[in-house]
Image (cartoon, rainbow, N blue to C red):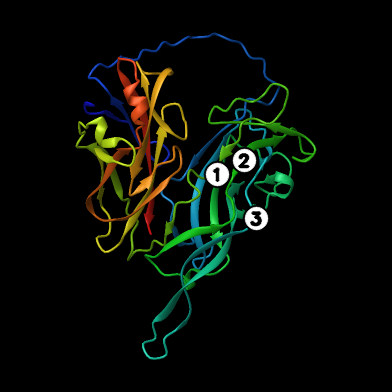
Amino acid sequence: MLPYPFFQILPPLNLALCTEYTYYWSMRKKNPFSFILLLLSVTIVPLGASITATYIPDTNLYFTIGSSPFAPSDFIAHLGTLTFYIPDNQLFAPSLVDMTATNNFSFTGPVTEYNDWQTGLPVYTTQTKTGRICAVTTVKGKTTYKEIWGQAGTQPLTDTSGNINTSVFVAEIYLVGYQTASHFKPGAIYSITGGTFGSFNVAVAQNSNGIYNSKEYISVNGQAIPSNGSQPAPLQLISNDAVPLPYVDPDHPYSTVDYLFGIIEEATFNVDNAIGTKATLAAKAQLTLSNSDPEKSYGVAIKFEDGNHDETFSLGLDGSKSIYTIGYTLRFLSQNVLGGVPISWNGLKEGINEQNILITGINATEAALAPSGDYSDTIIVSVTPKDTL
């Protein structure tokens, strides 16, 4: 008999809920330990590197109508805020560099081109429309927006030449539709179906000659800048390219759906019931939705990963897979799970939603020949909301 698994709920990370649990052949557990090594170092940095920046991607993405400097008819979504801090007020050509974002984006959802001749109401059909990235900045009291094209991976955030002469410089990044907001349906969901937001770095020019002649990388969010001037690790423009965007207006306010994930019925099961094609219940996944629309259906992408990041799953002797292992298959939503490959769990409604987690595919010979000891496997479960389907 296999005793019940051990489950540990971990906090959300990057819009994903993570749960780590371990299947055990015995109740015995080993407590992990860690240590911290503190290092003292001195880094010599080039002149001008005292400029730093922060970038905060907006975690609540939605479309709405424009406000200054955009027109009230514009269809916009705020993506994030980039802020420069300049101790000596010497700022030349603040720019996004090493960009991998595409020039154009497409998003799909209800679109109207005309009104019904009898009712006078808009007639909506599912269509795909396009947009682009823009940056809103204020220089010397004037607020403007600039389209972000990223030619050759470099995009100045303002057309102002010379020293901007400020201690703080802010660029608000938006996705802006080419069609006016009147074409879209308030309260509807729009999915990004084309284009890549990608990643970027930040740089400034060393003087008034411009970013294309003298580029110096700026550390964003404590990012490490290589001393040889090479490209640092890039930052993501948004945290999740796949998240759908609702169209928010006063009659359809933005509301965040709460997802609470847990494991229940940590069942004890007999190995014989999981041999070959037999399948037995190991646990149940429970996903509770709150603050959702009762009339709408939601979905998540759920991913199971072996502790060693293998595609297959196995129990290791005394917690180690280098001594002896017993392979098994994890089954969820009638699918055999491949480690690290997301499975869509759709049709979720307000309240409690449950699905069985099954164990199958244990090799009878492997189990019979297994040396005595404790066998366990650690599985990390990641749940990423897809919002309304």
Tally of marks: 3
Q: Is residue 57 or residue 335 the one in the foreground?
A: 335
- Assign a secondary structure to mark 3: loop
Going from the N terminus, do you reach mark 2 or mark 3 first? 3
Apparent side of residue 192 relative to residue 267 in the rendered image (left or right): right
Q: Name the image quarter holding residue 259.
A: top left
* Badge 2 amino acid: Phe
Could you tell me if the residues under marks 2 and 3 are in contact, i.e. CB atoms within 8 Å? no
147 shown above or below 119: above
Numbered circle sitting on residue 103? 3
In the picture of the structure, the residue carrying the numbered disc 2 is 200
As drawn, which residue projects farthest toward the bottom? 118
Quarter of the image that includes the C terminus: bottom left
Q: Residue 45, how many percent across, how many down? A: 67, 19
Q: Residue 261, how many percent across, how many down? A: 28, 41
Apparent side of residue 229 relative to residue 108 in the rendered image (left or right): right
Could you tell me if the residues under marks 2 and 1 are in contact, i.e. CB atoms within 8 Å? yes
Going from the N terminus, do you reach mark 1 or mark 3 first? 3
- Assign a secondary structure to mark 2: strand
- Assign a secondary structure to mark 1: loop
Numbered circle sitting on residue 384? none
* Badge 3 amino acid: Asn
In the picture of the structure, the residue carrying the numbered disc 1 is 237
Q: Is residue 208 or residue 319 the one in the foreground?
A: 319
Quarter of the image that includes the N terminus: top left
